[in-house]
Amino acid sequence: MNRKLIVAAFCLAAAFACKKKEETPAPAPAPAATPVAATTETQPPAKSATPQATVTLAAGAPIPGSGVALWLQADDAKPGEKVVSWTNPQVAGVTATAAAAEEQPMVVANALNGHSVVRFDGEQNMLMTNIDISPAGMPEATIFAVFVSRTEGTPPLRKLYGDDNGSYDRAAGLDNRAEGKNYTLFTGKDVAGDFRLEKEKPYLTTDQFAAKDVSTWVNGHATLTKVETDYGEALPNMYIGGTGTSYHELWQGDIAEMIVYGRVLSDQERTQVEDYLAKKYGMAVTRP
């Protein structure tokens, strides 16, 4: 090939390469990082530990007099009417009230050994008390209840009482998370099976919460003994006929009487309360 033609072809190729390089845009500069303001994690303030007030009953009371936080008897309510506010003059200032008309349970006369009961429909009825059974308000507690359930199946879950905010706080009732037992107790860590409940059968239960454990009795018979607990902050009110406002677990059945002490009772004191309730409601208690 002619030398002049080779040189011309080389120059033409070089010029074309230079042109392509000039037409290729340079990559855009990376955007500057958006500054992040320094933050300080703020923990919610701890709930102040305000002890729950209790009363001492007048002399001659059928149950131990000291340390009573709540005592509700269906006989104190008017039969045939819905419960707006459930009270007992022997424990002044303590009430269980319904937040709305549809939440009011009905009082039924002569339902249990000639005594009245408060009947919860399992759909809307629930009462809120003005006592605090959380560890902040009541480090130790003993809760007695006389009741009947109109169902024994789960789900749905149903609670006789509670103050649960979602952390397995103090609550008791029907639950399907304890193999072989449908009536259970929350321990702050999980669900402990208490006993096998039968519908339409009256029960007398005792739930005794110490600082780090819980023990229970059913019709005088021990069912749970010093089961380890780890309760945290809970709802500041005890609810009856449900576990509280966090979950819809409403009781379907009757409650005749409920007693709460702000302390652990001795065995002698506990049996005194159980014997009083058993005699009143025509129930048999069994003890070793």
Image (spheres, rainbow, N blue to C red):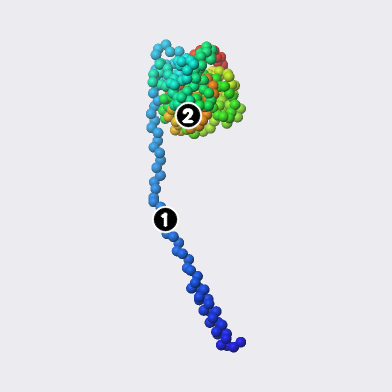
Please state which of residues 17 and 272 is positioned toward the viewer in this rendering.
Answer: 17
Tell me the SS state at disc 1: loop
| Snapshot quadrant of residue 222 | top right
User: What residue did someone put label 2 on?
Assistant: 244
x then y, percent, for residue 183: 56, 25
Please state which of residues 76 and 173 is positioned toward the viewer in this rendering.
Answer: 76
Which is nearer the N-term, disc 2 or disc 1?
A: 1
Kind of residue indicated by mark 1: Thr
x then y, percent, for residue 232: 46, 33
Say which residue appears at 54% left-offset and 24% top-offset: 252
Say which residue appears at 59% left-offset and 88% top-offset: 2
Residue 276, compared with residue 158, is above or below; it is: above
User: What residue did someone put label 1 on?
Assistant: 34
Say which residue appears at 49% left-offset and 13% top-offset: 276
Does residue 216 show up?
A: no
> The C terminus is located in which quarter?
top right
